[in-house]
Image (cartoon, grey):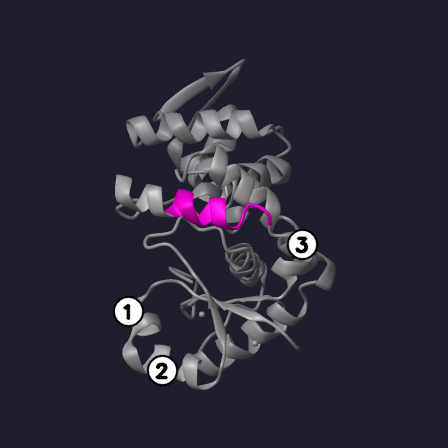
Amino acid sequence: MPKTSLEIHAQVIALHTEQQSCYAIAKKLGTTPSTVNRIVKRYGATGKLEEKRKVTNITTSLNTVRRALKRQRLRFAVRKKKPLFSECHKQLTHEWAKEHKDWTEDQWRKVVFSDDSKFNIVGSDGREWSEEWVFQQDNDPKHTSRSTVKWFNDHAITVLPWSPQFLDMSPIEHLWNEVDRRLRLRQDLPTNKDDLWKKLQGEWNCIEVEDVQKLVKSMPNRVQTLLKAKGGYTNY
């Protein structure tokens, strides 16, 4: 049976709440990024899907959509609020983009991206080393504490500057999303912490090196997109 428009809309929103990009959602659902962006904007304005919507001769309900999402191992959830992002943060982020606009792929390959990631036994509700390299981390208080800064200095490790409340430009976010997605698709979901850790390691190790390289190669384009947005929100 073909998917109804409402089912597609619900899947778009579910994937969007998983922080997947418009391009990734469009590719997964066989639609266009502009369509995904339009659905997300409409949902952001109303905060809900229509209870019933007639598509040609098919009438469906929200419960039908929920069941379809469940079959796809997707969650239907209220869209998460974006972190406070002031004009000051936007200016700092724009300055960061200008400082790194000429970085090459080779320079980005030397960056070790890091991120905290929290996984529950069932599902996930959050997201955490060559020669000459640079370490990237966000501005979480524990990352900027005196002891942490001292440790980096004592070990002569260069830390990539990161703007406060930075919109997620780190490609590692996409890897965590992929691990989370693969974990949800398993028939044998983890039952305890040790089992969860084992399965997380297994899914992480299954990620192809080529996929990681593609994400790193996307950094110059990410920076250019951030420049065009003048430090504001992007599709990444």
Nearest the viewer among 120 and 90 is: 90
Which residues, given as a range, are shown in magenta?
A: 93-102
Percent position of residue 229, x then y: 44, 34
Q: Tell me whether circle 2 and circle 3 mark residues in contact (CB < 8 Å).
A: no
Whether the magenta-drawn stretch holds residue 2 is answered as no
* Residue at x-position 58% and y-position 63%: 186
Secondary element at tag 1 = helix
Q: Earlier in the sequence, mark 2 or mark 3?
A: 3
Front: mark 1 or 3: 3
Rounded to the nearest angstrom, the CA distance separating label 1 from label 3 is: 30 Å
Rounded to the nearest angstrom, the CA distance separating label 2 from label 1 is: 14 Å
Query: Does residue 71 appear left or right of residue 93 in this picture?
Result: right
Whether the magenta-drawn stretch holds residue 96 is answered as yes
Q: Residues within 10 Å of mark 3 (few under 14, many from 20)?
A: some
Q: Residue furthest top?
A: 56
Percent position of residue 147, x then y: 31, 82
Residue designated by label 1:
141
Residue designated by label 3:
105
Q: Amino acid at mark 1?
A: Pro
Residue 150's disc number: 2
- Could one spot residue 34 in this view of the protein? yes
- Could one spot residue 49 in this view of the protein? no
Secondary element at tag 3 = helix
